[in-house]
Amino acid sequence: MAFLDIHQLQKSFGALRVVKDFTLGIDKGEFVSFLGPSGCGKTTVLRMVAGFETPTSGAIRIDGRDVTGLPANRRKIGMVFQAYALFPNLTVEENIGFGLKVAGEDKAAIRKRVGEMLELIGLSQLGGRYPFQLSGGQQQRVALARALAPRPQVLLLDEPLSALDAKIRVSLREEIRRIQRDLGITTIFVTHDQEEALSMSDRVVVMHQGVADQVGTPFEIYNRPATRFVAQFVGTLNLIDADLVDAAAGRIRLGGVPVALNRSLPGQTGKRISLALRPETVALGRKDEGNAVVLAGTITEVHFLGAVIRIRVAVEGGLVSLDTFNQPDRPPPSIGTPVEISVSHRDLLVLAA
Ligand SMILES: Nc1ncnc2c1ncn2[C@@H]1O[C@H](COP(=O)(O)OP(=O)(O)OP(=O)(O)O)[C@@H](O)[C@H]1O
Ligand SMILES: [Mg+2]
């Protein structure tokens, strides 16, 4: 059984159903991200796991024990909140030691543990400072140390990086993952930043309107999105129109060209469907591989981004963005140029509506 077991969790506020039948098992030591747009219920699920919110129905088990009815302070959970929540009138050391003091640990043990935590987050020199004397990144490190100090069995992080600027976010997310791995602590990390979720997680839960649309490794979520929402929310996506000629046999017509995908496809024979393509799977020119669709089009946009050049091509059925790598001895093509683009059959995603 999973170490943290969230079973058929539901939460309504009045008539508003915010979390609908949310089930998820998380292994010991696993790092799982909840990814989803604002208001989809991420914080609400986290607060129910922590014990700050009572589920309308469903159960939460940790290490085989039902904790659904337990108060927050008896669940052995550490939480870092969406906004900074350090105690402004306590020093860094007092903030980190707060949970231990409440638990009645003796002074010497608290001092030792606080020292370890300060070392873990690399702020040993700043133990005597107050929160207002710290940068945003330092404050979030202290919040992390404070959550970890009482040795929780589960760590919950609710968008701990959202208030920080881009550079610090990247270095801090690597640090959080390093600390999490070192301690082997089971962790849920909430974010609406897809890059954060993909780069940090063992598994990602994509949430949408109170349900988990898909649960999978970052690789699975990105390459095999289960729904149109997941495909569009995670990564850049091209959608082009096609005709579904035979759903069972996997035959479509794309830009007037018949294509045999030879796998059964969702949808109804005879209907228009949307095909999804990731920019990096589309090649400019013909691919020298048999199972590729070649489409004729015209370049409508060229964005030089440095290492990558993103080119937009109008084909019958829609606009397709594709990425090519910069080549110093070859300037990018110009707008208006007629081109061919090609995509391997396996990279044409037919999404369920
Ligand atoms: N105590 C409450 N009473 C009534 N409605 C609430 C309460 N808490 C949350 N909600 C509503 O539940 C929905 C989900 O809120 P939640 O905070 O879980 O979203 P979220 O996914 O964390 O969003 P964000 O990314 O903006 O933090 C929202 O529509 C919110 O207004
Ligand atoms: Mg939230």
Image (tube, rainbow, N blue to C red):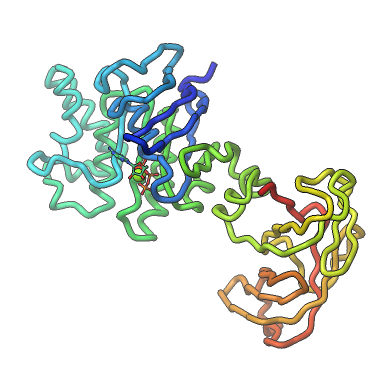
Q: Quadrant location of ligand 2? A: top left
Q: Position of residue 182 (x, y in %)?
A: 43, 32
Q: Residue furthest top?
A: 65
Quarter where residue 305 is shown: bottom right
Up-down relation of residue 229 to residue 179 (above or below): below
Q: Position of residue 133 (x, y in %)?
A: 13, 52
The residue nearer to you, when weighing 308 against 338, is 338
Up-down relation of residue 146 to residue 199 (above or below): above
Q: In the figure, is residue 192 to the left or right of 123?
A: right
Q: In the figure, is residue 27 to the left or right of 328?
A: left
Quarter where residue 17 is shown: top left
Quadrant of the snapshot with the N terminus: top right
Q: Position of residue 353 (x, y in %)?
A: 66, 49
Residue occupying image coordinates x 51% and y 40%: 201
Q: In the figure, is residue 305 to the left or right of 168?
A: right
Residue occupying image coordinates x 71% and y 81%: 299
Residue occupying image coordinates x 84% and y 47%: 247
Q: Position of residue 344 (x, y in %)?
A: 82, 58
Quarter where residue 275 is shown: bottom right
The residue nearer to you, when weighing 341 against 128, is 341
Residue occupying image coordinates x 85% and y 64%: 293
Q: Residue furthest front?
A: 15
The residue nearer to you, when weighing 140 against 112, is 140
Up-down relation of residue 204 to residue 153 (above or below): below
Q: In the figure, is residue 323 to the left or right of 183?
A: right
